[in-house]
Image (cartoon, rainbow, N blue to C red):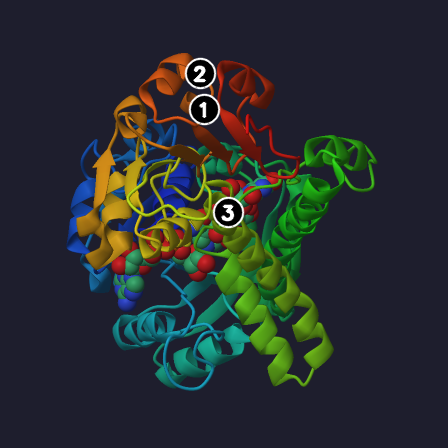
């Protein structure tokens, strides 16, 4: 094999991206390592630690050929020419910047381990999403190696979305590779370009300076989240004015300057990154004294919180202002369809609020029940969990759609209606159901962004 690649961090990003590189580049040895033994053990089985459509096939194409998983981080570092680092970079929960700044402790630990162990020159690739200027800190830590060896830091942020990770990696809109614009930096940049050039068309591989690459990742997520908050803000106005947010989104999105994607009004965006990356952007702006810019982006998060909370308030109001002892079925707990990930899922907020109001909450989800139990912590004791939506709905006053799982569209809604308390409510937090049809069956239906269809 011509080169050795290591990846530190075998999570939602490290696992799929390295599996794709290994499948597409049989000439490279790819070694994925993590401190989490259970996660690494699962990557070696057919029961992968994360659910992603098509991922098992990609892993199986390369595993034990040129793709290896282990907890032996030191060996992986020593052997590698190129080290991708895709450890988690959550929001800091303590000290200065708590609740906003990125917690870089995992990144820094990895950088120090690389310096301690490396005996030959390495290219260190920032795969995690990091604050702009992190590469400078990395260089400062890595340069502590002195003359023993040398490092070049590259920024190669990841743009995959969960649930579509394999397709996003196979056909990325772009691959972004940023480096220092020195001869050594440009040489290292080319080595990373060469990896992706094995399957990504040349025009989709974009290079830039290292700071632009770091910042572009935060900005891409901020723009995507902003679109959702924009349409969600309009959904509130639609509910007051008898306009339909679906019709407004279609009309606005047909303008080619706006584009049709990411305009689905919802109960709010979740996922591990939008909130943390915007908080991080806000913190960075504040630290440069750009208070107006910080306020602007904070608005995207404020709108998301408003959307989540007005969804629950509407549930309570329409159910005659009391939900004490009422059975309410949450259909879906994952933050989006086709993933088992529940990080920052709006369902967590909704479930907790309903429990505060003393409702009997039942959660159903085809993939995310284990995570749902963990997310609800002590409160989980008072919640029922089932993977059968029919069972969840039986005897319920209301069904609330929390995740846009395809299977919910094709359920036998007549059967569900017959098994529920009356009046039977549907709160469609994802606008995926046929509201008129459900209304015709007898349900009172509460979509996002269009007036309710009520029988009372
Ligand atoms: P994750 O939590 O799923 O995985 C991170 C892994 O790093 C964990 O398995 C953890 O055990 C491991 N780790 C932490 N410290 C370590 C250490 N010192 N040595 C070895 N392993 C260590 O996180 P993720 O969702 O894969 O995200 C990773 C990064 O990628 C984040 O910065 C995130 O913002 C970014 N990102 C995530 C997504 C996504 O869809 N989840 C997409 C694009 C970018
Ligand atoms: C997002 C970005 O799309 C990826 O490009 C990025 O790499 C990733 O964050 C990251 O940095 O982690 P992801 O969070 O996996 O990916 O999923 P999205 O498809 O972006 O959905 C995020 C949330 O927005 C979900 O809760 C989804 O249901 C919601 N959403 C999305 C809407 O409410 N409306 C829409 O129109 C689109």
Q: Is residue 28 left or right of residue 49?
A: right
- The tally of labels here is 3
Q: In the picture shown, does residue 139 fall above or below 345?
A: below
The kind of secondary structure element at disc 3 is helix
User: Taking the image as four quarters, which one is ligand 1 found in?
Assistant: bottom left
Q: Is residue 371 left or right of residue 54?
A: left
Estimate the x, y position of residue 371 in percent, counting from the top left: 27, 46
Q: Is residue 41 left or right of residue 418?
A: left
Cα gap from disc 3 to disc 2, whole angstroms = 28 Å
Cα gap from disc 1 to disc 2, whole angstroms = 7 Å
Q: Nearer the viewer, residue 427 or 62?
A: 427
The kind of secondary structure element at disc 2 is loop
Q: Nearer the viewer, mark 1 or mark 3?
A: 3
How packed mark 2 is, by other alpha carbons closer than 10 Å (few <14, some 14-19, many 20 or more), is few
Estimate the x, y position of residue 165 in percent, counting from the top left: 45, 38
The kind of secondary structure element at disc 1 is helix
Can you identify the residue that label 2 sits on? 410
Q: Quadrant of the N terminus?
A: top left
Q: Which numbered circle lies on residue 317?
A: 3
Q: Nearer the viewer, residue 262 or 160?
A: 262
Q: Quadrant of the C terminus?
A: top right
Q: Nearer the viewer, residue 115 or 388?
A: 388
Can you identify the residue that label 1 sits on? 406
Mark 3 or mark 2, earlier in chain? 3
């Amino acid at each position: 094999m011509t080169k050795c690649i290591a990846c530190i961090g075998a999570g939602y990003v490290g696992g799929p991206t390295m599996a794709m590189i290994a499948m597409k580049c049989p000439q490279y040895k790819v070694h994925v390592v993590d401190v989490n033994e259970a996660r690494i053990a699962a990557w070696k089985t057919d029961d992968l630690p994360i659910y992603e459509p098509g991922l098992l096939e990609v892993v199986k194409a390369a595993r034990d050929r040129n793709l290896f998983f282990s907890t032996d981080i030191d060996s992986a570092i020593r052997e590698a020419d190129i080290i991708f680092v895709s450890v988690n970079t959550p929001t800091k929960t303590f000290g200065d910047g708590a609740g906003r700044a990125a917690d870089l402790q995992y990144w820094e630990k990895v950088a120090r381990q690389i310096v301690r162990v490396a005996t030959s020159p390495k290219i260190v690739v920032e795969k995690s999403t990091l604050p702009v200027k992190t590469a400078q800190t990395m260089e400062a830590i890595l340069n502590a190696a002195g003359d023993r060896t040398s490092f070049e830091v590259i920024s190669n942020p990841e743009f995959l979305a969960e649930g579509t990770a394999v397709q996003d990696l196979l056909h990325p809109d772009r691959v972004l590779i940023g480096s220092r614009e020195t001869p050594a930096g440009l040489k290292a940049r080319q080595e990373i370009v060469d990896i992706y050039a094995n399957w990504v068309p040349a025009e989709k591989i974009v290079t830039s300076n290292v700071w632009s690459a770091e910042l572009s990742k935060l900005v891409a997520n901020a723009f995507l989240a902003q679109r959702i908050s924009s349409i969600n803000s309009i959904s509130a106005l639609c509910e007051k004015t008898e306009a339909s947010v679906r019709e407004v989104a279609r009309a606005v999105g047909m303008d080619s300057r706006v584009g049709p994607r990411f305009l689905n009004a919802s109960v709010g965006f979740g996922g591990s990154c939008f909130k943390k990356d915007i908080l991080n952007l806000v913190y960075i702006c504040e630290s440069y004294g750009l208070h107006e810019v910080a306020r602007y982006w904070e608005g995207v998060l404020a709108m998301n919180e408003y959307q989540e909370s007005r969804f629950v308030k509407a549930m309570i109001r329409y159910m005659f202002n009391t939900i004490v002892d009422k059975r309410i079925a949450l259909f879906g707990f994952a933050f989006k369809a086709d993933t088992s990930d529940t990080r920052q899922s709006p369902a967590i907020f909704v479930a907790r609020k309903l429990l505060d109001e003393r409702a009997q909450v039942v959660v159903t989800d085809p993939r995310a029940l284990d995570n749902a139990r963990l997310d609800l912590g002590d409160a989980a004791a008072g919640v029922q969990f089932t993977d059968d939506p029919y069972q969840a709905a039986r005897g319920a006053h209301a069904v609330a759609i929390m995740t846009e799982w395809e299977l919910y569209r094709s359920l036998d809604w007549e059967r569900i209606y017959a098994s529920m308390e009356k009046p039977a409510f549907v709160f469609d937090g994802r606008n995926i159901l046929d509201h008129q049809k459900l209304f015709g069956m007898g349900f009172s239906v509460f979509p996002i962004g269009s007036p309710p269809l009520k029988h009372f």
